[in-house]
Image (cartoon, helix red, strand yellow):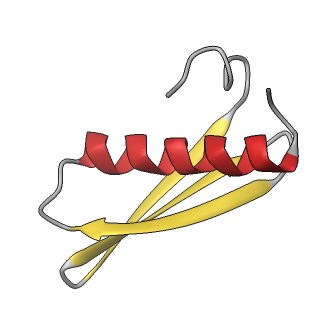
Amino acid sequence: MTKQSLQGREVILELVQIGQFVKVTAMDTASLTEISIQGPASAPESTLKANAIKRLEYVLRKKGLIS
Protein backbone atom coordinates (compact mmCIF):
# COMPACT_ATOMS: atom_id res chain seq x y z
CA MET A 1 0.00 0.00 0.00
CA THR A 2 1.29 3.43 -0.85
CA LYS A 3 1.23 5.14 2.50
CA GLN A 4 0.73 8.72 1.32
CA SER A 5 -1.99 8.22 -1.27
CA LEU A 6 -4.24 5.87 0.74
CA GLN A 7 -3.31 7.15 4.18
CA GLY A 8 -6.35 7.62 6.37
CA ARG A 9 -8.64 5.70 3.98
CA GLU A 10 -10.38 2.49 4.98
CA VAL A 11 -10.01 -0.33 2.46
CA ILE A 12 -11.98 -3.57 2.72
CA LEU A 13 -10.36 -6.67 1.18
CA GLU A 14 -12.08 -9.96 0.37
CA LEU A 15 -10.35 -13.09 -0.94
CA VAL A 16 -12.41 -15.93 -2.42
CA GLN A 17 -10.82 -19.07 -3.83
CA ILE A 18 -12.46 -20.34 -7.00
CA GLY A 19 -10.75 -23.54 -8.09
CA GLN A 20 -7.13 -22.79 -8.91
CA PHE A 21 -7.68 -19.03 -8.74
CA VAL A 22 -8.33 -16.47 -6.02
CA LYS A 23 -10.59 -13.49 -6.64
CA VAL A 24 -9.50 -10.47 -4.60
CA THR A 25 -11.92 -7.58 -4.18
CA ALA A 26 -10.83 -4.26 -2.67
CA MET A 27 -13.22 -1.44 -1.81
CA ASP A 28 -12.51 2.12 -0.70
CA THR A 29 -15.23 2.92 1.83
CA ALA A 30 -15.04 6.70 1.39
CA SER A 31 -15.81 6.71 -2.34
CA LEU A 32 -17.46 3.25 -2.56
CA THR A 33 -15.04 2.42 -5.39
CA GLU A 34 -14.56 -1.32 -5.82
CA ILE A 35 -12.11 -3.32 -7.93
CA SER A 36 -11.46 -7.03 -8.44
CA ILE A 37 -8.40 -8.93 -9.57
CA GLN A 38 -7.61 -12.60 -9.99
CA GLY A 39 -4.47 -14.52 -9.20
CA PRO A 40 -3.28 -18.08 -8.80
CA ALA A 41 -4.25 -19.85 -5.58
CA SER A 42 -0.58 -20.72 -5.11
CA ALA A 43 0.41 -17.04 -4.84
CA PRO A 44 1.09 -15.63 -1.35
CA GLU A 45 -1.88 -13.85 0.18
CA SER A 46 0.25 -10.77 0.83
CA THR A 47 1.10 -10.50 -2.88
CA LEU A 48 -2.54 -10.80 -3.92
CA LYS A 49 -3.59 -8.14 -1.40
CA ALA A 50 -0.79 -5.79 -2.46
CA ASN A 51 -1.74 -6.14 -6.14
CA ALA A 52 -5.39 -5.41 -5.36
CA ILE A 53 -4.48 -2.31 -3.35
CA LYS A 54 -2.23 -1.07 -6.16
CA ARG A 55 -5.08 -1.53 -8.64
CA LEU A 56 -7.50 0.30 -6.34
CA GLU A 57 -5.00 3.14 -5.98
CA TYR A 58 -4.67 3.33 -9.78
CA VAL A 59 -8.45 3.54 -10.23
CA LEU A 60 -8.82 6.19 -7.52
CA ARG A 61 -6.06 8.27 -9.15
CA LYS A 62 -7.68 7.91 -12.57
CA LYS A 63 -11.01 9.12 -11.13
CA GLY A 64 -9.24 12.06 -9.47
CA LEU A 65 -10.24 10.97 -5.97
CA ILE A 66 -6.65 10.86 -4.67
CA SER A 67 -3.50 12.62 -5.74
Front-most of 27 and 1? 1
Q: Classify residue 65 as left or right of residue 21.
A: right
Q: Classify residue 14 as left or right of residue 11.
A: left
What residue sits 33% from the left and 51% below the top?
A: 48
The location of residue 29, given as percent across then percent down, is 78, 43
Relative to 51, does residue 23 appear above or below in the rendering? below
Front-most of 48 and 64? 64
What residue sits 18% from the left and 80% below the top?
A: 20
Relative to 66, does residue 51 appear above or below in the rendering? below
> Image quadrant for the C terminus?
top right
The location of residue 53, given as percent across then percent down, is 52, 42
**Occupied quadrant, residue 11:** top right
Q: Residue furthest left?
A: 42
The location of residue 58, given as percent across then percent down, is 64, 46
Q: Classify residue 31 as left or right of residue 22.
A: right
Q: Classify residue 39 as left or right of residue 54.
A: left
Front-most of 64 and 20? 64
The location of residue 36, given as percent across then percent down, is 54, 66
Q: How many marks?
A: 0
What residue sits 85% from the left and 39% below the top?
A: 30
What residue sits 28% from the left and 44% below the top?
A: 47
